[in-house]
Image (tube, rainbow, N blue to C red):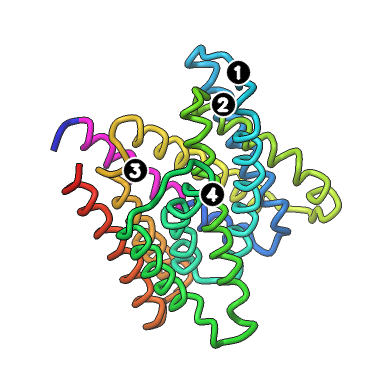
């Protein structure tokens, strides 16, 4: 492997560890309102993005033609975080993580509408297989008990759509730190009224876990940004699925969670499809 590819893999594994720990800290914070958790997660992310921007010396600039893309990235990304955090509180950590990892497949679909990129037949097939895997995790035959899983899948859809708008803004010349800062500040300001209305007093332990969730989320965001700086997605994106392994291990060790047979089959379909796309993209490169 080239040196930059190895660095990209290392950073994407670091990001997977960061996002897995974020989910764990969100759960450990206890039964606090979702908006309270979202606020603190994005408050820390905003501070980190601001420091990154200051350190790089880049100006805070969004071209007129990119404002809609940055706004929609922020809005849809915020909805995705809310859905993901709600799912984390109601599902096993590994299941909520796997449903969120449907985002690359939804990005294929949304790229058609947002970027005008036509997926090839292989991409459509991968999307259908991945959705079949998600159905095994969701288990729709269980009725209302599948609601948290559907919310988790919606979070994955929002994440994939938001990442597509990130790409659109990036193609327009908007820097990554600017996009992260806009998203984090927008989320904090938007959820602030709900946070204040639903606020529940926290002890020092809960506050610590919320701040740690923000730090872990910022680590994950930084890792993803650095990873794709060193290597293209087609070379390293499949390694992002190691987050599911981290999540499953942490869920077992900390919460004694074991996925059922249907969930494991769903994981295998989704991860297997991601590996297939990865190998296929390398052959056509």
Q: CA distance from mark 3 to mark 2?
A: 20 Å
- Give residue 279's position: percent from left, percent from top: 20, 53
Q: Nearer the viewer, residue 261 or 206?
A: 261
State if disc 2 and disc 3 touch (CB < 8 Å). Answer: no
Query: Which label is found at residue 178?
Result: 2
Residue marked by disc 4: 161
- Give residue 251's position: percent from left, percent from top: 44, 67
- Sequence-earlier tag: 3 or 4: 3
Name the element at disc 3: helix
Residue marked by disc 3: 12
Would residue 100 be found to the left or right of residue 14 on screen? right
Q: Is residue 114 above or below residue 64?
A: below
Q: Nearer the viewer, residue 211 or 86?
A: 86
Hey, which quadrant is residue 11 in on the image?
top left
Q: Is residue 273 above or below residue 191?
A: below
Would residue 246 be found to the left or right of residue 160 on screen? left
The residue that appears at 54% across and 54% down in the rendered structure is: 25
């Amino acid at each position: 492997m080239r040196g930059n590819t190895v660095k990209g893999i290392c950073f994407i594994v670091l990001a997977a560890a960061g996002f897995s720990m974020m989910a764990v800290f969100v759960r450990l914070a206890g039964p606090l309102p979702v908006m309270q958790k979202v606020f603190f997660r994005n408050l820390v992310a905003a501070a980190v993005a601001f420091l990154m921007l200051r350190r790089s010396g880049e100006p805070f600039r969004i071209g007129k033609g990119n404002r809609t893309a940055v706004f929609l990235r922020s809005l849809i990304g915020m909805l995705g975080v809310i859905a993901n955090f709600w799912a984390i509180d109601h599902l096993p950590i590994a299941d909520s993580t796997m449903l969120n990892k449907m985002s690359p497949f939804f990005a294929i679909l949304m790229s058609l509408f947002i970027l005008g990129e036509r997926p090839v037949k292989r991409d459509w097939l991968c999307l259908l297989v991945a959705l079949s895997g998600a159905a095994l995790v969701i288990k729709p035959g269980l009725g209302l008990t599948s609601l948290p899983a559907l919310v988790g899948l919606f979070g994955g859809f929002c994440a994939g759509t938001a990442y597509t708008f990130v790409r659109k803004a990036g193609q327009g010349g908007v820097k990554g730190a600017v996009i992260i800062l806009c998203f984090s500040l927008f989320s904090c300001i938007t959820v602030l009224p709900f946070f204040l209305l639903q606020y529940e007093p926290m002890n020092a332990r809960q506050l610590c876990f919320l701040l740690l969730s923000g730090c872990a989320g910022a680590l994950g965001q930084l890792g993803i940004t650095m990873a794709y700086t060193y290597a293209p997605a087609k070379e390293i994106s499949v390694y992002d699925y190691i987050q599911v392994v981290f999540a499953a291990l942490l869920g077992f060790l900390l919460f004694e969670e074991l996925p059922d047979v249907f969930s494991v089959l769903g994981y295998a379909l989704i991860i297997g499809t991601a590996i297939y796309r990865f190998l296929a993209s390398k052959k056509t490169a």
